[in-house]
Image (cartoon, rainbow, N blue to C red):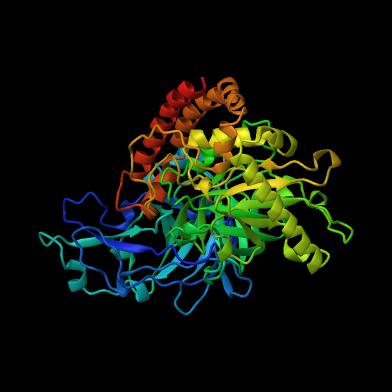
Amino acid sequence: MKKSFLYGITGGLMILLALSACGGDSDLPANTEELTTLPLAEAVTETVSGQASEDVPESAITEAGLSEMTAAETISETGGVTAEAPTEAVTEGDAEMTVETTSRAESVTDTQTEVPTEAETASETLPETYETLASPPEHRIYTRELRVTSTEKMTVDAADLTEGMENDKRLTHVRISPSLGYTCVGFEAGGVLYGGNVIPLSMMSDGADIVLRMDYATYELPIVNISVEGREITSKTEYVDMTFSLENTEDIMIGVPGGIRMRGNSTADMPKKPYRIKFAQKQSLFGLDKARSWVLLAEYLDPSCLHNYAAMYLAAASDELEFTPTIHHVNLYLDGEYQGLYSLCEQVEEERLGIEMEITSSMRELTDFSFLVCMDERAPEEDKPYFFVPSVGRYFQLKYPAREDFAGKRQFELFMTQLEAYYNEMADAFNQRNNNWFKRNLYTGTLMDHLIVDQIMGEEDHVWKSFYTYHDATDESRKGKIRFGPIWDYDYCLYTPWTGEPNECYDIDTMVQYSNFFYRGFVESRYGSKVAARYSQHYADVLAELIPHLETYHDSIKASLALNQERWYSYDPNLTEDNFDFMIRFFKSRQKVLGKLWG
């Protein structure tokens, strides 16, 4: 196993305290001697110094029955990596713990903890929080340490401690509640590492330091850590400097520089923000081709987080669609704060399609140029070239080439004039069901498979947005014909009504809708029979394979889905699972509907 460290997390875990009432019959230990311990020297092998700061807000959430706690009752956390932070080393046996010294005595180190072997654990009973470490997982166990000074953080008088408690039970312990996305592995006091998240008040004497060990709440998915050092990400055009780390995967990345900005149209207005990241140099993620630009899809309108994943699965089974983004689900942390489950995938761009080319001044005809065009009703709102096709009432935006790629203004204007005329001609051909035009000017197989994927998914956004077409002039044999795709944007689909909120409609709609003018004109031409044959001979089997695959995959990411549910949909504890159940029922219904239509 390759050694690695947990770098680059900044911001707070926002540790909250909940005071536990314990009488004589309490099952919690009354003193430190009754706690099972694990010596620090056995748990720590290597450390990396780090620092940051973030105070916990005064309004802290506590356990039921306790009144709102004050700032003095709250343990705050700090994190991150810095070269300037003054440090001092605290050594226990062969293990060295490096901590930052600050005026508020709040420090963090990112620690790689060796998983105890069976031989090491056989001679002692481990605390409950360490039971899962007895069988070493495939990944390293990462922890982070939070230094808290009891003098500054735990100064509360007896009245504060007893307020709201029943039966006058004596308070003897403090229960540590980590922020969402983290778990408390244990704490260290006096050079001894204790398991669990309950700290006896007897340890909270003046001047005592308690070091909390925190870990990620789940390792079932890769983990993305992005640090922007507290800067706000609000623009869809201006990038904010970032460092990017990818962990809990085969090829980890630590502190890679780049930029991050918001992306999307309607989704950018949702509480859970989608992002586009751009590395300073090309990077490969998850073994995919190197590129500078990648996207983090928020999937806020899809509580199941599996709509885009399912659509990409279907499109990847096509031998006509040349490029389909690959979804990798990740748990995202931004400046140390858990953001939720995201879909990380490639950006749809010319580089991925293999159509990049250098434009020279001698190029005059439209077929001399590669281009990528997206149907998008919001095109007039963005600073990219676009045009309007009156016969179908749709806006089209030029994604590639950029205006500055052309040899001059006159060449660009001539290109745009020809491009607009060509798409007007294309719209007329679809309105007239012109079979000969389709044959001469289109790779019809790409439109056919795109259409079938959209019918399986119950996709309606492609009526007016997120619908791509492109032309490749890099190869003489490919010139002169339009390709459809790549597929994109399936977070809100399954023929559910648009409300601007996460899906709460679980009524199956069995309609077959061709409101996209490309689809309508195509299926009503002689190519309609070819669409039916393509579905029955290929996609019926792909859909049959997709359903059990989704059920298995869903079960494998349940912990991450639960965290995402708590982060964004706490108002409805069943929303995620209800959406997943609805999606499976919808796909089973599509098998019947499309089987009857095209079987």
Asked where in the image residue 156 lies, by quadrant, the reply is bottom left
Residue 122 appears in the rendering:
yes
Q: Nearer the viewer, residue 510 or 205?
A: 510
Residue that sits furthest to the right in the current view = 362
- Which residue occupies 74% across, 55% down? 418
Q: In the image, is 347 to the left or to the right of 232? A: right
Residue 196 appears in the rendering:
no
Q: In the image, is 483 to the left or to the right of 67? A: right
Does 152 appear above or below 49?
below
Q: Nearer the viewer, residue 213 or 299?
A: 299
Q: Nearer the viewer, residue 256 or 177?
A: 256
Where does residue 222 sit, x and y in percent of width and height? Answer: 55, 47
- Which residue occupies 51% across, 59% down? 265
Asked where in the image residue 359 lies, by quadrant, the reply is bottom right
Where does residue 518 sit, x and y in percent of width and height? Answer: 59, 41
Q: In the image, is 440 to the left or to the right of 242? A: right
Asked where in the image residue 227 lies, by quadrant, the reply is bottom right
Count the labels in the image.
0
Residue that sits furthest to the front in the current view = 432
- Which residue occupies 29% across, 53% down? 571
Where does residue 485 sit, x and y in percent of width and height? Answer: 64, 43
Where does residue 550 sit, x and y in percent of width and height? Answer: 48, 33
